[in-house]
Image (cartoon, rainbow, N blue to C red):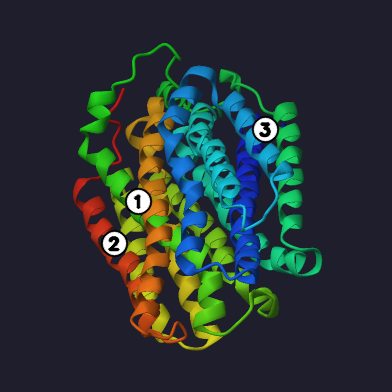
């Protein structure tokens, strides 16, 4: 049996997100070790960690536009060339602040092109009945990458130093770049699955992007309430994810007096849980839709609401647990159900605007990136304010606000999605 090319494309985009999140987690781990060694304070650490997101936000909408005009395949190639080159040549020295700021800004710009391009590619290749599990598999690469990074990179830093992480990340980027260049291509119509004649036109128009010369309905997109429901939930998802991704190592070290090197396999469980729940959500969503158990709209709202509400509860319980197992459990539940919620809002781009999925993703991910800028930087300031108030960073009180803010945001966003979202196509 011939292996459909679109499956290979989905697998390659999964590998792409995997490598990207190894880079993001790797920098957080390596920089935290290097910064602590020279006594960098928490506010300055937060500033450097958030620089990536300033660059990332700048290229989201341009990335969607470029993918629409030039094709997602080419834009992904350019992205990997840029960020892999930076990782290969830039030294990780916390005292060279300007160099670190510029390098993280440029890496952010390069990686900001990736997700709008991926959504453009998937909207070209994947028919409607396979969207949920395809997008969920692709995005689950982020979480597997984060899990692998948390498991392997602390030992690499310990044995070979923080700079070694940059070298490994550059090699991974180049390896994926070469594989993508060799195997990726623009989609032929013949790769779409055979379906009944009455559904054939629907599948083909749903799986192929609009011509690159079609006028983009910017005003309608920007003033659409279903689009804003996606945007709000993307912001919240990434606020919670980026705060946990960038500050969990510090919470384990300062709040629980644990080092990542000594935590073994357990430190990767939150991200491994995201990988599992992301794919469970995708398969479940496609099952509910294809078996006509629920409509597309009800499926998206159900999974989004369950994911975000359960995640909120776990986030707010996290600082109450003062044992390593309790903290790992809460962070695993929170991130796992956040990933489940992606089968709601994150696939919704291609429901409402399949021909402009890259553009809508660029707008939505701009909000998600702003969440990284706000959340990562704000968390550093919250902890510095706690220290200024003579609060001990080993106490749960000093960390409560850090985790309660994303918890409240999850509850608010789930209601917004319930009220304003739809699973129907609104942009032809």
Q: Position of residue 397 (x, y in %)?
A: 35, 84
Mark 1 surroundings within 10 Å by alpha-carbon count, few (fewer than 14), some (14 through 19), many (20 or more):
many
CB of mark 1 within 8 Å of CB of mark 2?
Answer: yes
Q: Residue at the spot x=42%, y=78% of the render?
A: 318
Residue where numbered disc 1 is placed: 235
Q: Earlier along the polypeptide chain: callout 3 or callout 2?
A: 3
Q: Does residue 193 appear in this view?
A: yes
Q: Residue at the spot x=56%, y=39% of the render?
A: 106
State how far apart marks 3 and 2 are (Cα).
36 Å
As displayed, is residue 233 above or below residue 260? above
- Position of 44 with respect to 20 (left or right) is left
CB of mark 3 within 8 Å of CB of mark 1?
Answer: no
Q: Which mark is residue 409?
A: 2
Q: Position of residue 198 (x, y in %)?
A: 40, 24
Q: Say which quadrant the N terminus sits in.
A: top right
Q: Does residue 295 appear in this view?
A: no
Along the line of sight, the residue nearer the viewer: 187 or 212: 212
State how far apart marks 1 and 2 are (Cα).
9 Å
As displayed, is residue 239 above or below residue 333? above
Q: Earlier along the polypeptide chain: callout 1 or callout 2?
A: 1
- Position of 384 with respect to 421 (left or right) is right
Along the line of sight, the residue nearer the viewer: 358 or 254: 254
Q: Residue at the spot x=75%, y=70% of the render?
A: 158
Q: Earlier along the polypeptide chain: callout 3 or callout 1?
A: 3
Q: Position of residue 8 (x, y in %)?
A: 67, 36
Q: Residue at the spot x=44%, y=28% of the render?
A: 62
State how far apart marks 3 and 1 are (Cα).
28 Å
* Foreground label between 3 and 1: 3
Q: Which mark is residue 81?
A: 3
As displayed, is residue 214 above or below residue 400? above
Along the line of sight, the residue nearer the viewer: 96 or 379: 96
């Amino acid at each position: 049996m011939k292996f459909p090319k679109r499956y290979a494309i989905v697998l390659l985009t999964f590998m792409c997100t995997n490598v990207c999140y190894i880079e993001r987690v790797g920098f957080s781990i390596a920089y935290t070790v290097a910064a602590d060694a020279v006594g960098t304070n928490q506010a300055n650490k937060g500033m450097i960690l958030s620089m990536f997101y300033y660059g990332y936000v700048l290229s989201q909408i341009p990335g969607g536009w470029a993918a629409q005009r030039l094709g997602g395949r080419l834009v992904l190639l350019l992205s990997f060339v840029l960020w892999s080159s930076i990782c290969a040549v830039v030294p990780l020295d916390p005292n060279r602040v300007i160099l670190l700021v510029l390098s993280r800004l440029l890496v952010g710009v390069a990686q900001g092109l990736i997700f709008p391009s991926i959504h453009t590619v998937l909207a070209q290749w994947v028919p409607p009945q396979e969207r949920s599990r395809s997008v969920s598999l692709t995005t689950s690469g982020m979480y597997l990458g984060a899990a692998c990074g948390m498991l392997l990179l602390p030992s690499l830093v310990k044995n070979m130093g923080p700079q070694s992480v940059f070298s490994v990340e550059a090699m991974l980027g180049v390896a994926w770049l070469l594989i993508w260049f060799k195997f990726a291509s623009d989609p032929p119509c013949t790769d779409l699955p055979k379906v009944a004649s009455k559904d054939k036109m629907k599948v083909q128009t749903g799986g192929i992007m609009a011509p690159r010369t079609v006028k983009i309905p910017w005003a309608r997109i920007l003033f659409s309430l279903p689009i804003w429901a996606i945007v709000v939930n993307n912001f919240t998802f990434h606020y919670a994810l980026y705060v946990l991704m960038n500050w969990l190592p510090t919470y384990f070290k300062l709040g629980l007096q644990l080092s990542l090197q000594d935590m073994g396999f357990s430190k990767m469980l939150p991200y491994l849980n995201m990988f599992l729940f992301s794919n469970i959500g995708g398969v479940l969503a496609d099952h509910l839709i294809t078996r006509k158990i629920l409509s597309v709209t009800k499926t998206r709202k159900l999974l989004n609401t369950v994911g975000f509400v359960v995640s909120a509860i776990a986030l707010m319980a996290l600082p109450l647990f003062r044992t390593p197992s309790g903290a790992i459990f809460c962070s695993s539940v929170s991130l796992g159900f956040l990933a489940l919620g992606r089968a709601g809002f994150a696939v919704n781009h291609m429901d409402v605007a399949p021909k402009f999925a890259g553009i809508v993703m660029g707008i939505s991910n701009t909000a998600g990136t702003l969440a990284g800028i706000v959340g990562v930087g704000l968390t550093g300031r919250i902890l510095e304010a706690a220290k200024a108030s003579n609060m001990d960073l080993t106490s749960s009180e000093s960390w409560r606000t850090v985790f309660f803010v994303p918890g409240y945001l999850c509850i608010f966003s789930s209601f917004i999605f319930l009220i304003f979202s739809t699973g129907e196509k609104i942009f032809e």
